[in-house]
Image: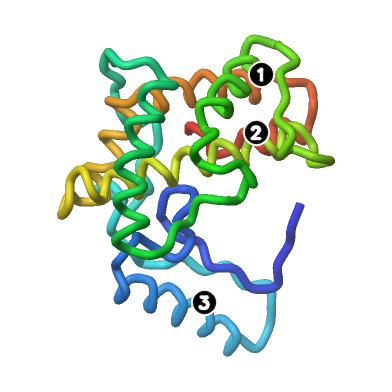
Amino acid sequence: MLKPPRALWVPFPFGLPLGHPEDVAEQRAVLDAAFALLDAPDGPVLADFAGELGADETGTAIQASAVEPSAVTLGLADEVTTMRRYWEQWTDRAGRTAVGVSGVAPVKFRGVVRFLEAYVEGGARDLPERGDTALPLFVRYCVDDLRILYLEGRLVMKPGETPADTQHWFWGQTALGAFLRTLGDVMNASDDELTRGCAWGIAR
């Protein structure tokens, strides 16, 4: 477990460590707060960032457990393909993306879906991009890429939507949000410590 001498806790969804896309003021505030920890004479120091966007009324980041899921009509693989089209519009406009930690190109994300579905069912499907990466870590990387693709694509679908509403949409109305609840349960039930550690935050 990492034990940094100085750390800043941020109330944002996983994949958004500096705040929300296109919010320069929020991202600058996060960086300023992090660098301010260097002024502390002694460590360890763990400080809370007083951000509110993407949080509920208590200031806590919205997680799956706080959202009532509704029925979804689109299959996960088809939903991912649809969201990829919105994501492509986002990257064309913004010229950047946070997708990429898994090393799998977004055009191959239907394969990522099949890989994750097989993992949940106890199957042995794999992806060449995994390489020597431990399986639980690679699963987590794939999840993070899919989640960010959705969040960036949502910026095109619903420009101006509040981050809190985006999180409610993700956890309550998408096939991916529903699937991640199941994936999180499967990983948390594992006897493997690394698997349980990688499950933390997938769908709390």
Find numbered disc 1 in the image and state the secondary structure of the residue it sits on.
helix
What's the residue type where badge 2 is placed?
A: Val
What's the residue type where badge 3 is placed?
A: Ala
Q: Is residue 172 above or below residue 146?
A: above
Q: Earlier in the sequence, mark 3 or mark 2?
A: 3
Q: How is the image coloured?
A: rainbow
Please report the residue visible at 33 percent of the width from the left and 39 percent of the height from the top.
85
Viewer-closest of 152 and 178: 152
What's the residue type where badge 1 is placed?
A: Tyr
Q: Position of residue 50 (x, y in %)?
A: 36, 67
Image disc number at residue 139: 2
Q: Is residue 111 left or right of residue 44?
A: left
- How far is disc 3 from disc 1 in space, using C-alphas? 37 Å
Q: Position of residue 82 (x, y in %)?
A: 33, 31
Asked if labels 1 and 2 touch by Cβ distance under 8 angstroms, the answer is yes
Residue corresponding to mark 1: 119
Please report the residue visible at 50 percent of the width from the left and 50 percent of the height from the top.
99
Residue corresponding to mark 3: 34
Question: How many neighbours does mark 3 have within 10 angstroms: few (below 14), some (14-19), or many (20 or more)?
Answer: some
Q: Position of residue 12 (x, y in %)?
A: 41, 54
Please report the residue visible at 69 percent of the width from the left and 38 percent of the height from the top.
138
Q: Is residue 129 above or below residue 71?
A: below
Q: Earlier in the sequence, mark 2 or mark 1?
A: 1
Q: Is residue 71 left or right of residue 192?
A: left
Find numbered disc 2 in the image and state the secondary structure of the residue it sits on.
helix
Number of the front mark, 3 or 2: 2
